Amino acid sequence: MTENLNQPREYDAVLGGQVPPPVDALVLGGLEGAKLRLNSNDIKVRIAAFTELINYGEIGLDLLLDLFQNEKSEEVQKSAYLLLRYRTEAKVKKILQTYDHWQLFDDIGILEGESHLAQCMVISPDSQTLFTGGRHGTIKAWDLNLGKLKYTQLVKSASIISLDISLDGKTLVDGSKFIKIKVWEVKSDKIRRTQFLKNEGGGSIIFVALSADGQTLFSGTAYNSTKIWNLKTGIWQGFEGDKWAATSYAISQNKQTIVTGMHIINLWDVETRRLKKTFKSLSEVKIIAISPNEKNIIGAFGDKTIQIWDVDTGNIVHTLTGHSDYITSLAISSDGKNLVSASRDQTIKIWDLNTATLKKTLHGDSGCVNCIAISPDGQFITSGSNDKTINIWGVP
């Protein structure tokens, strides 16, 4: 006998009765009752109705998916998204593949452990561990699943300004104010230093990055050129014909292109070590980034704006405005769809990189946001600020 989905069940709020309910009371049981509650003006009632639909098998799931795609309330969307997030049905996965969960991002919480003024950060390839570099020569490792500090490594140098981790998660590199670069072997309970590289010629190391195979290190200093280090020999060399000073650096997601910027933007081929492209900037670029498809260069400027260049033409195609103070950090999601910016104005902004529109502004830090990182799986953002906290942002 076919089960009647419109009949009340044991988990329905009301199982029936002899006296008719008031006209404005939401007491109808079964699937029809859940449908009726979805039209309520009370968000809590609608969220409860969304949750209830899961109990009604395929029909309830189809209804939930349909409503999820048309729901306007962010709070209700969050609840529906969390219900659907880990379901294995093909039709659910198909809808979630095109759904922009970044619009639901909010403050998830603060990592527990010692207070820490982070200046830079990087997330491991498996999105499980966050490494942060601080002002007093420390590197901290944080367990992102537990939300707690794993361990602290005293580096015994000045502020750690830049961090990078290899694609296999086994090697960590840092750059500091004392013109020193350190290479670390990453273990579950600690990091162990394997190399110590001195940057001859002086200048704070403001950029470090590892090649795809982890055998080559790239470093950049303020108002100086990029150096390429062979980690087997410890010997360095520069890019061919590099004569431009730079104040900002970035490496492409596939580790094949280095971007250097100041008043001149240069794209360098990692394999051939030659210049691929160059174009001018109207003012000094403070922070720079490159999209995963390498079609756009993104730069932050002292006037609080962000500009997006088309690499093919060298022209500015979009200017993003919205921050009320100096921009401190830029990051791009691995799918190339989202640009994240941090600022001294204590906010983090998420931009749609394709349409150059603002998706969301995140509030919660009580100090200048110094650095940000996006998890490789695209599920959360981490930030470090002058209030000495490490915040996590995602779908609560």
Image (cartoon, rainbow, N blue to C red):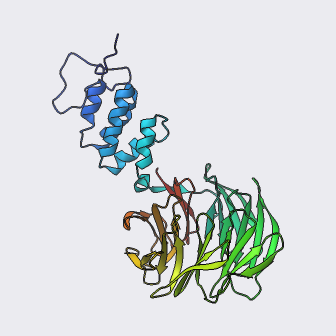
Residue ranking furthest to the left: 23
Question: Foreground: 294 or 282?
Answer: 294
- Where 359 sits versus 345, above or below? above
Can you tell which quarter of the image residue 69 is in? top left
- Where 2 sits versus 275, above or below? above
Question: Foreground: 8 or 235?
Answer: 235
Q: Quadrant of the N terminus?
A: top left
Q: Position of residue 89 (x, y in %)?
A: 46, 34
Residue sitting at 64 percent across and 56 percent down?
125
> Is 264 left, or right, of 154 in this rendering?
left
Residue sitting at 51 percent across and 67 percent down?
291
Q: Position of residue 318 (x, y in %)?
A: 38, 74
Question: Foreground: 143 or 329?
Answer: 329
Q: Position of residue 157 (x, y in %)?
A: 75, 77
> Is 245 left, or right, of 233 in this rendering?
left
- Where 367 sits versus 362, above or below? below
Q: Position of residue 145 (x, y in %)?
A: 61, 49
